[in-house]
Amino acid sequence: MIGRNHSIVSEFLLLQLLIESEHQNLFYALFLAMYVTTILGNLLILVLICLDPHLHTPMYLFLSNLSFSDLCFSSVTMPKLLKNMQSQDPSIPYAGCLTQMYFFLFFGDLESFLLVAMAYDRYVAICFPLHYTAIMSPRLCLSLLVLSWMLTTFHAMLHTLLMARLHFCEDNVIAHFFCDMSALLKLSCSDTRVNELVIFITGGLILVIPFLLIITSYARIVSSILKVPSARGIHKAFSTCGSHLTVVSLFYGTVIGLYLCPSANNSTVKETVMAMMYTVVTPMLNPFIYSLRNRDMKGALRRVFWRKKTPFSL
């Protein structure tokens, strides 16, 4: 940094997690185990969907993209967090900070859109089973994916460019374990009203509307199943929808609470815990909730494993 007031910030310092020294190694092992679980779980899903032709359906096309998004979303923050826990240098270059922020927004937004596409896919499959193939055509699925990737690219780039135009003063300590957009705005010496307005407007489009669409889709699914009473069907519906909605609520609830409904009473520890829920816990749980509990995925696991074990069978 140069000067006193409008200094040029060449790097930021990320806030270390408030963990007592005797528990540092324990939490490091816990976070490392969670990250490895996230990587392996999502990689397994990607491999199974690629290798098993039975999984080449719209549902698993969206799942493969979700797994890729979760894998990358977790990798945006976790490696740096783990490195900082083992080193005494929590610095991150200015360009690296903006890059981390861009990819954090990109993969976070992508997950939001993919969750909507998956909820719609389940809605069509359960409520309109006879028309499922016609409705969820390859063209529609590809269009939904392309639209999701394009919108996330635009949204992440918009916020990154708006952040790049701001000036930062002497204080370069980010009160977070990654380059969080709201934490960066608090450090800026510039007028951040435009940034805050864009966050509020686009946040409603990127977060609130998709969340409401997901809730509506699952409400219609439950309503459709309850019209044809069946103990097994009702149990399956509530089991599936309940587990899916748990992860959806965990992801959207923490994100909306942090960015769209911030509280002046929120402490750094509370914000860190909430951020951990959607950056670490949700990507780790998604493989179990959406796939590894799925009968088709278990069947694919057996088929791929058996094929690998018997390569010379006639």
Image: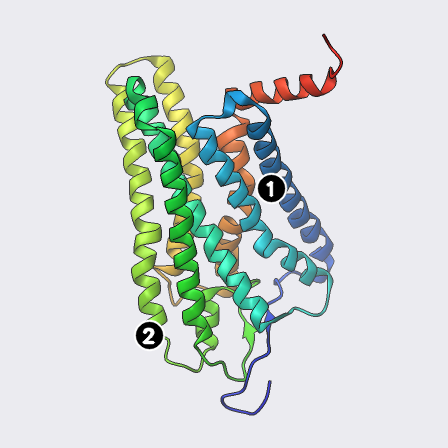
Residue 38 disc label: 1
Q: Residue 201's quadrant in the figure?
A: bottom left
Q: Residue 199: where, in percent of width, then height?
A: 35, 63
Q: Earlier in the sequence, mark 2 or mark 1?
A: 1
Front residue of 270 and 51? 51
Front residue of 85 and 1? 1
Instruction: Give SS at disc 2.
Output: helix
What is the spatial separation of the Cα atoms under label 2 and label 1, in whole angstroms? 37 Å
Q: Which amino acid does label 1 sit on?
A: Thr
- The residue wearing badge 2 is 193
Instruction: Examine the rendering and report whether any part of residue 151 can be seen.
Output: yes
For disc 2, the neighbor class at 10 Å (few under 14, some 14 to 19, many from 20) is few
Residue at left offset 59%, top offset 78%: 10
Vertically, is 234 above or below 200? above
Quadrant where the C terminus is found in the figure? top right
Q: Residue 258's quadrant in the figure?
A: bottom left
